[in-house]
Image: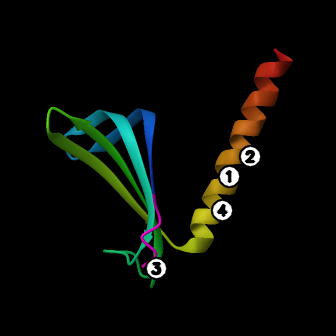
Amino acid sequence: CTYQTERLAVEGSGKGPAGWFRLTDATVYLDHPVHAPAGHTLNIDFLRLEDGALERVAVELDPGSARALATSILSTLDALAAFVAEG
């Protein structure tokens, strides 16, 4: 494990067992997966840390899927920026 961990504040929503909740934080790290069939995964935890309560949505992606997702996110945001600029 690399112990490479990034934590950032986010604004958004996630859906957990009790329904939708506000997201306040995200943690991105490389580790051995809990469930995904891979040796190491990029893990993303979307969290709401509030009043001591923890709500969480966890994602484990193999490296190829993580890179494809990152590319897709950037491509989609670039398209949105071009759309907004056009008016």
The residues bearing labels 1 and 2 have C-alpha atoms spaced at a distance of: 5 Å
Task: Assess disc 2: are there few (<14), some (14-19) or many (≥20) residues with their C-alpha within 10 Å of its C-alpha.
Answer: few
Verify whether residue 24 appears in magenta. Answer: no
From the viewer's perspective, is 14 left or right of 38? left
Q: Residues within 10 Å of mark 4 (few under 14, many from 20)?
A: few
Question: Which residue, as the protein is rendered here, is positioned at the far right?
Answer: 86
- The span shown in magenta is 1-5
- The residue indicated by pointer 3 is 40
* x 38%, y 41%: residue: 25
Give the CA separation, mark 3 to mark 4: 16 Å
Q: Secondary structure at mark 3?
A: loop
Cα–Cα span, label 2 and label 3: 26 Å
Tell us which disc is closer to us: 3 or 4. Answer: 3
What crowding class fits label 3: few (fewer than 14 Cα within 10 Å), some (14-19), or many (20 or more)? some
Q: Quadrant of residue 1?
A: bottom left
> Residue type at mark 4?
Ala
Q: Residue at x 77, y 36 (%)?
A: 79
Q: Say whether marks 1 and 4 touch (CB < 8 Å).
A: yes
Circle 1 is placed at which residue position?
A: 72
Circles 1 and 2: CB atoms closer than 8 Å: yes
Name the kind of residue labelled 3 in the image.
His
Badge 1 marks a residue whose secondary structure is: helix
- In three-dimensional space, the C-alpha distance between marks 2 and 4, rounded to whole angstroms, equals 10 Å
- Identify the image quadrant of the C terminus: top right
* Circle number at residue 68: 4
Residue denoted by label 2: 75
